[in-house]
Image (cartoon, rainbow, N blue to C red):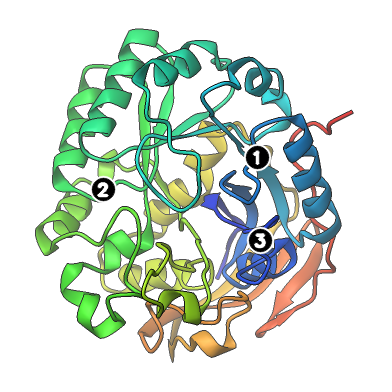
């Protein structure tokens, strides 16, 4: 079966500053192995991407190493509203962190939230990491400023019900859900281990997970939030939050399709069509993924291409396997082997001059 190359609008490449976890070469290799031909990278690197200098440096690294197409988000800070807005055409969009996560980009002052909502160009995507009360505040700001806002990695029943109500009122919000919030819950923590199960937002209850499935029509995108850390870091006394997810996502969706929980149209709407529309992304000509939807196999994290080398889905029995990936007419992945050269990916936004 042939499907279009997938788009992942929420990944962490960890470069610069965290290359021991992942870099643009290994992260985009992992993307291709997962059937993903375009990634949008988050700005909470070290240093974070918040100005022209850090954006230019990160795009230079990506341009020399990325094996699939890409764009880079810029992060909202307390004092960079004008600088960030001036760089909008060169970015995937603006990312605002309204709750704690990995990195140093959390915005504590609600006035800063409002300033960025007002100042960021309405023609460019604005994404927020918001949970619970801050998610409600983000929806209010979307209504007050009358601008589209994308809500990242929704995980709770209360959140998806609020989003449903907001959409019914015509408030311009869209949202994404990550595979670990669809296929794992807090009851899985002991088997994964407390350290390795650390993620933001945290794994939720079975009822929360069921609410996401029950309200699938309100979920615009699936996004992995690929956030690699080493096993040693995850097993430490202070485990950082985040899971690798690029290589397990499509097989998980295909497994759900085999169970009647998703249709192929559901997957393509949330992994291709809607992300392209929400994030204003170009089509990729002659780009597709060959899959065997009936293949049953066991996910082995040790054979994955991410530098992190582990997965909360290690040992899962899956139905549906990726056989090959073609990007712009060239086979870039086949039968477990990455064939794309570092630097062969394209920056899908305008180049910095």
Cα distance in 3D space between marks 1 and 2? 33 Å
The residue shown at (26%, 73%) is 259
The residue singled out by tag 2 in the image is 216
The residue singled out by tag 3 in the image is 288
218 displayed left or right of 37: left
Q: Residue 73 at x, y = what percent?
A: 61, 38
The residue shown at (64%, 19%) is 85
Nearer to me, 178 or 227: 227
211 displayed left or right of 242: left
Cα distance in 3D space between marks 1 and 3? 31 Å
Secondary element type, mark 3 = strand
**Eye-nearest disc, 3 or 2:** 2
Secondary element type, mark 2 = helix
Q: Dividing the image into 4 quarters, which one contains the N terminus?
A: bottom right
10 Å crowding of disc 1: few (<14), some (14-19), many (20+)? many
Q: Residue 327 at x, y = what percent?
A: 75, 60
Disc on res. 49: 1
């Amino acid at each position: 079966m042939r499907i279009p190359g997938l788009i992942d609008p929420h990944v962490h490449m960890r470069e610069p500053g965290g290359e021991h976890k992942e870099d643009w070469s290994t992260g985009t290799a992992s993307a291709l192995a997962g059937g993903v031909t375009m990634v949008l990278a988050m700005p909470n690197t070290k240093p974070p991407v918040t100005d022209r200098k850090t954006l230019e440096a990160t795009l230079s690294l990506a341009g020399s190493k990325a094996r699939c197409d890409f764009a880079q988000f810029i992060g909202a800070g307390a004092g960079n509203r004008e600088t960030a807005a001036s760089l909008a055409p060169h970015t995937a969009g603006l990312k605002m962190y309204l709750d704690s996560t990995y990195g140093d980009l959390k915005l504590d002052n609600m006035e800063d939230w409002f300033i960025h909502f007002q100042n960021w160009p309405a023609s460019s995507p604005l994404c927020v990491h918001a949970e619970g009360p801050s998610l409600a505040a983000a929806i209010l700001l979307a209504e007050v400023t009358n601008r589209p806002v994308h809500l990242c990695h929704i995980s709770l029943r209360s959140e998806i019900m609020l989003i449903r109500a907001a959409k019914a009122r015509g408030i311009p919000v869209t949202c994404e859900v990550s595979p670990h919030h669809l296929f794992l819950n807090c009851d899985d923590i002991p088997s994964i281990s407390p350290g390795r199960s650390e993620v933001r937002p945290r794994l939720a209850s079975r009822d929360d997970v069921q609410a996401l499935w029950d309200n699938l029509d309100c979920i615009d995108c699936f996004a992995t939030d690929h956030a690699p850390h080493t096993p040693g870091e995850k097993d430490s006394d202070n485990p950082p939050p985040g899971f690798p997810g690029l290589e397990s996502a499509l097989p998980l969706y295909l497994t759900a399709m085999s169970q009647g929980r998703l249709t192929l149209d559901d997957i393509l709407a949330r992994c291709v069509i809607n992300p392209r529309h929400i994030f204003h992304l170009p089509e990729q000509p002659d780009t597709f993924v060959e899959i065997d939807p009936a293949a049953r196999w066991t996910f082995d994290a040790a054979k994955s291409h991410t530098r992190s080398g582990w997965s909360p889905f290690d040992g899962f029995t899956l139905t549906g396997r990726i056989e090959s990936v073609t990007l712009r007419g060239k086979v870039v992945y086949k039968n477990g082997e990455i064939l794309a050269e570092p630097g062969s990916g394209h920056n899908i936004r305008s180049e910095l001059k």
